[in-house]
């Protein structure tokens, strides 16, 4: 299984997802600011992976403060810098709630630490939490994969959007985790991977991962999905999520909503796969989810090549929100949830 980030004391190495699939280049982030820039510029992307990278960034900075600080540096003296770090990371990408989940976990840990704790101990506790969040994400994804595969009894053909695999998580993947589990259980006939304009996460990243894992796939452009469904070639659609509101409304990569509408028309199950850390019970419905808008250049250029007049007015929302009424199942590590969704009322 591919791992897209590796931490060693003082350095977070990230595979540069902007260069895939043509080049496998690793970027070394050696400061918190470099981790924040790596998230902003999509060196690392995908909701769970963003949360894990933020965790490693906080562990990295605590380590640096410990090794570069004075021998008697204490948590109390570092706290202001820690809160600034949390604030900096919170401003990188607004939609993926896993980022805020990770930051909250660190803030809660910070509240537990007595003021006179040495920075060597704080650095160790930050490291342990970052490692826990990373390991937990892999365990969670495997469980999502198993639960998702249990929906199907015989081999079926699907379609997936964006990249939700090892690159987008700490490993294994959410929607792609379900695809992996189905493949290993011989429940997957075929999988369409759509390109996912404008950033091509499907074509560049999902195709790259499936090829590495010898899972056969067929690449299509986004506007071929309807025709594939009309021809009876798609039995289900599975996507990931960046934020799931309490009522099940789901923000995910732009184009997810169009697929959900197509599924409704063709009576095809539309499945959302995500860890519980993507469920934001404080956001009651999708209208409250902040949707990131990204730079115009992502539409004007493909790999540095201009494909539209530079004078064009451009709108580039990076996500859309699929209403819960269009979602057949939400699969988390806790199981397969069916509508009506009300996560704050759920008992596990
Ligand atoms: O802009 P991105 O590439 O970070 O968006 C990623 C997605 O929308 C994924 O589908 C989502 O984060 C789930 S990843 C397991």
Image (cartoon, grey):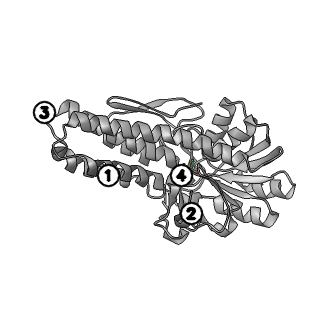
Secondary structure beneath label 2: loop
Q: CA distance from mark 1 to mark 4?
A: 34 Å
Q: CA distance from mark 4 to mark 2?
A: 40 Å
Q: CA distance from mark 2 to mark 3?
A: 48 Å
Which callout, 3 or 1, points at the residue further toward the start of the chain? 3
Going by the picture, which residue comes out furthest to the front? Answer: 347
Provide the residue designation for mark 4: 298
Q: Closer to the observer: label 4 or label 2?
A: 2
Up-down: is 139 above or below 292? above
Which callout, 4 or 2, points at the residue further toward the start of the chain? 4
Give the residue drawn at x 61%, y 43%: 143
**Quick one: label 2, few (<14), some, or many (20+) residues within 10 Å?**
few
| Percent coordinates x, y for residue 320 in the rendering | 58, 62
Provide the residue designation for mark 3: 70
310 left or right of 150 in image: left
Secondary structure beneath label 3: loop
Quadrant in which residue 139 is drawn = top right
Numbered-mark total: 4
**Quick one: label 3, few (<14), some, or many (20+) residues within 10 Å?**
few
Up-down: is 128 above or below 148? above
Give the residue drawn at x 74%, y 51%: 151
Provide the residue designation for mark 2: 346
**Quick one: label 4, few (<14), some, or many (20+) residues within 10 Å?**
some
Q: Closer to the observer: label 3 or label 4?
A: 3
Q: CA distance from mark 3 to mark 1?
A: 24 Å
92 left or right of 233 in image: left
Secondary structure beneath label 4: helix
């Amino acid at each position: 299984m591919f791992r897209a980030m590796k931490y060693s004391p003082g350095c977070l190495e990230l595979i540069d997802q902007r260069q895939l699939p043509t080049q496998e280049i690793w970027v070394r982030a050696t400061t918190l600011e470099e981790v924040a820039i790596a998230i902003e510029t999509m060196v690392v992307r995908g909701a769970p992976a963003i949360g894990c990278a933020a965790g490693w960034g906080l562990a990295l900075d605590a380590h640096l403060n410990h090794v570069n600080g004075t021998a008697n540096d204490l948590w109390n003296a570092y706290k202001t810098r820690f809160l600034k770090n949390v604030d900096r990371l919170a401003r990188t990408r607004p939609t993926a709630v896993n980022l805020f989940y990770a930051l909250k976990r660190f803030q809660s840990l910070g509240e537990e630490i007595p003021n006179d704790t040495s920075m060597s101990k704080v650095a160790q506790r930050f490291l342990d939490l970052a490692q826990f969040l990373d390991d937990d994400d892999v365990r969670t994804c495997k469980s999502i994969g198993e639960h998702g595969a249990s929906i199907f009894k015989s081999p079926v053909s699907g379609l997936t959007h964006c990249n939700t695999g090892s690159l987008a998580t700490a490993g294994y993947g959410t929607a792609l985790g379900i695809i992996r589990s189905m493949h290993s259980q011989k429940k997957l006939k075929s999988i369409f991977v759509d390109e996912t304009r404008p950033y091509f996460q499907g074509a560049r990243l999902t195709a790259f991962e499936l090829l590495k894992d010898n899972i056969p796939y067929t690449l299509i452009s986004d506007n071929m999905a309807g025709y594939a469904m009309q021809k009876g070639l798609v039995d289900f659609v599975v996507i990931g999520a960046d934020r799931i509101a309490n009522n099940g409304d789901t923000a995910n990569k732009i184009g997810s909503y169009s697929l959900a509408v197509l599924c409704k028309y063709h009576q095809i199950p539309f499945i959302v796969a995500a860890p519980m850390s993507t469920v934001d019970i404080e956001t009651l419905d999708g209208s409250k989810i902040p949707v990131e808008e990204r730079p115009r250049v992502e539409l004007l250029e493909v790999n540095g090549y201009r494909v539209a007049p530079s004078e064009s007015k451009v709108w580039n929302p990076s996500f859309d929100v699929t209403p819960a009424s269009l979602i057949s199942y939400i699969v988390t590590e806790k199981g397969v949830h069916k509508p009506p969704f009300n996560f704050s009322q759920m008992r596990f």
